[in-house]
Amino acid sequence: MIGPTTRRTPGGFNESGSSSDPPPPPPPLSPLEQLLATQIAILQQLAQGPQQHQHYGRQDHHPQVARYEDFLGTQLPLFSRADEPLEADAWIRAIESKFSILAAPCSEDRKASFTAQQLRGAVLLWWENYRAMLPANHVVN
């Protein structure tokens, strides 16, 4: 006796609806399509973030931390003077909100160092004097 057979439909599909023949290969891409495919791949890599990038053929297993350049890219306000306490409070809140949008975490001591770079004038002089009075190994956060 001969084994069971599957009845084929005119389109090459068996009665269950699946094709028994592999699909034909896609047509070759035009140069424009190749360029677009390359650009899409680059954009996808950028969207994955820096922690996904490979360095010299190996994954970078060090935790990613925020850099000062990342912080500066958030369009920070400068602080040189406040006539009212609420102005200083508003500036501090604005700076704190910038840390929340960074892609990588930022330690508390780095936050203080980064923030101090936004001080100007008499406020900067006060900060420098304050730091000078602290013990040499003291970490400000």
Image (spheres, rainbow, N blue to C red):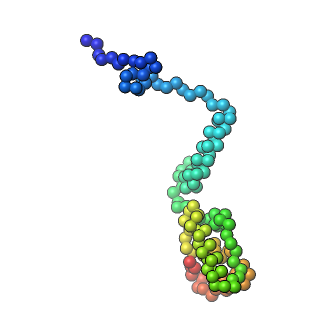
Q: Residue furthest top?
A: 1
> Where does residue 48 sit, x and y in percent of width and height?
56, 52
- Which quarter of the figure has residue 88? bottom right
Q: Residue at x 63, y 63 (%)?
A: 70
Q: Quadrant of the C terminus?
A: bottom right
Residue 81 visible, this angle? yes
From the viewer's perspective, tell me whether residue 87 is left or right of residue 59.
right
How many marks overall? 0
Q: Residue furthest bottom?
A: 133
Name the residue nearer the viewer: 74 or 109: 74
Compared with 32, 91 (above or below) is below
- Which quarter of the figure has residue 73? bottom right
> Where does residue 122 sit, x and y in percent of width and height?
72, 84
Q: Residue at x 39, y 18 (%)?
A: 8
Q: Residue at x 56, y 48 (%)?
A: 57
Name the residue nearer the viewer: 91 or 123: 91
Q: Quadrant of the N terminus?
A: top left
> Where does residue 49 sit, x and y in percent of width and height?
57, 54
Compared with 118, 45 (above or below) is above
- Which quarter of the figure has residue 116? bottom right
From the viewer's perspective, tell me whether residue 76 is left or right of residue 47.
right
Name the residue nearer the viewer: 2 or 114: 2
> Where does residue 61 sit, x and y in percent of width and height?
51, 57
Residue 113 visible, this angle? no
Q: Residue furthest right?
A: 121
Q: Residue at x 61, y 28 (%)?
A: 28
Compared with 54, 38 (above or below) is above
